Amino acid sequence: MDAVRYFSYAERTLALLVQIRWPNGVTCPMCGSKRVSFISTRRLWKCGQRHDRRQFSIKVGSIFEDSPLPLDKWLVAMWLIINCKNGISSYEVARDLKVTQQTAWFMLHRIRKAMQRGSFEKMGGAGPVEADETMIGGLARFMHKDRKALKIKGTGGVGKELVVGLLDRETGKVRVAHIKDRKKKTLQDHVRANVGEGAHLFTDELASYTVVSPNWWKSYKSDTTVERFY
Ligand SMILES: [Zn+2]
């Protein structure tokens, strides 16, 4: 209750999130510039550099971006994760935050990933992102594509792990994660959790990333493009 009350002040919540996300000062998620001005009436910043989408909120380019949930709910969820020594289930979070269990699960997943990475930032703010998945622990790399698809259905075969790598071409940052399968939904969720809205995504597996869910692409701005890179 204390946490809920504490975070119910929008100004306080925003100030805290700014501190966590940009400890060295507010930075434009599009170009990385620190020359930004705050529009307090709208709780938005405006970048001083010339480029598209100069106005941004705390959500843009962060793990909160594609969620309509208010920030205080995110913060209470974080507070719960950090303060519950024995871990917290999505059912408890759902009850405390008055959201569905599915929503609570989504929040916990995003927050835990961000804590592992030590960052709320998504990739692709300043430049394109390349995505590719491969098998580790076998010769999947050299398999014919169709055979590979067949082999790594489900768990990925005995002794082999399926990993997906994301490269931010502008910053050179790479994120590699283990994923349970290469189903459309799994890949889609992974990209959504890690790549910012409007980013250019390059991949050699066009189908896996797009056919997935037209809704995801619809929810993205029209300047989102997926291109075949290889
Ligand atoms: Zn900028």
Image (cartoon, grey):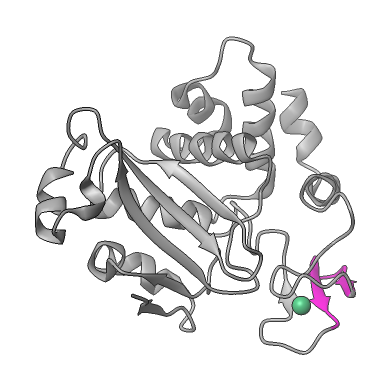
Rendered image quadrant of residue 172: bottom right
Q: Indicate left or right for 194 with 207 as reference.
A: right
Number of numbered markers: 0
Most common secondary structure along the magenta stretch: strand
Residue at the spot x=61%, y=57% of the render? Answer: 173
Which region of the structure is painted magenta? Answer: 36-48
Q: Is residue 143 above or below residue 230?
A: above
User: Is residue 66 positioned above or below 23 on the image?
Assistant: below
Picture coordinates of residue 174, whole percent (x, y): 56, 54
- Using the image as rendered, state which of residue 115 and residue 228 is in the foreground: 228
**Along the viewing direction, whichever of 46 and 172 lies nearer the viewer:** 172
Quadrant (top left, top right, bottom left, bottom right) of the C terminus: bottom left
Q: Position of residue 78 (x, y in %)?
A: 66, 32
The residue at 64%/35% (across/down) is 115
In x, y percent, where is residue 159?
Answer: 24, 28
Q: Quadrant of ligand 1?
A: bottom right
Residue at screen point 50% across, 26% down: 95
Q: Residue furthest bottom?
A: 50
Q: Is residue 182 left or right of residue 89?
A: left
Q: Residue at the spot x=26%, y=34% of the render?
A: 160
Is the residue 5 above or below the residue 60 in the image? above
Give the quadrant of the N terminus.
top right
Q: Position of residue 64 (x, y in %)?
A: 60, 53
- Seen from the viewer's position, the closer of residues 157 and 101 is 157
